[in-house]
Amino acid sequence: QVQLEESGGGLVQAGGSLRLSCAASRRTFSAFPMGWFRQAPGKEREFVAAISWSGGTTYYADSVKGRFTVSRDNAKNTVSLQMNSLKPEDTAVYYCAARKGTGATTMSAQYDYWGQGTQVTVSS
């Protein structure tokens, strides 16, 4: 079992930045590919970014490419999402997720553990 806890959400003006962090409870965290997803009110949960266990491979949704950066620190059992040039349409609850499989993926159904989420609100 892996417990995940997100932090770093908040209210920011359009064009601003936030850095989300996800802390994992398990020392074998380094073996898990990780993903970030978000869900806006009335919408389906959508993929944002993913990173392989080593950090060597990353994936991004087209809507955030060039603005968001995913990274991880396996020594600290954390994964981060740096969000720059935020837009009102980025407003959502952001979730981190861990996958028991061997590769990062954009598919939420392939992730096994989820955090409770952190709210990000971008004002115009």
Image (cartoon, helix red, strand yellow):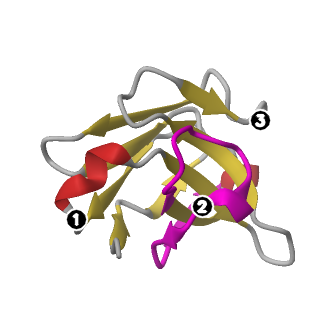
Q: Which mark is residue 74?
A: none
User: Is residue 51 shown above or below 31?
Assistant: above
Q: Residue at x 28, y 53 (%)?
A: 29
Q: Is residue 58 left or right of residue 110?
A: left
Q: Estimate the spatial distance between the alpha carbons at disc 3 and disc 2, rounded to whole Å.
A: 21 Å
Q: Residue at x 34, y 71 (%)?
A: 2
Q: Estimate the spatial distance between the alpha carbons at disc 3 and disc 1, rounded to whole Å.
A: 31 Å
Magenta span contains residue 42: no
Q: Callout 3, which amino acid? A: Ser
User: Is residue 9 shown above or below 90?
Assistant: below
Q: Is residue 79 left or right of residue 88?
A: left
Residue pointed to by mark 3 = 63
Q: Quadrant of residue 111?
A: bottom right
Few, some or many C-alpha atoms within 10 Å of disc 3 (few <14, some 14-19, many ≥20)? few
Q: Which mark is residue 26?
A: 1
Q: Number of callouts in the render? A: 3
Magenta span contains residue 108: yes
Q: Position of residue 78 (x, y in %)?
A: 26, 50
Could you tell which of marks 1 and 2 lies nearer the N-terminus?
Answer: 1
Q: Position of residue 22 (x, y in %)?
A: 34, 58
Q: Callout 2, which amino acid? A: Tyr
Look at discs 3 and 1 and give the one toward the viewer.
1
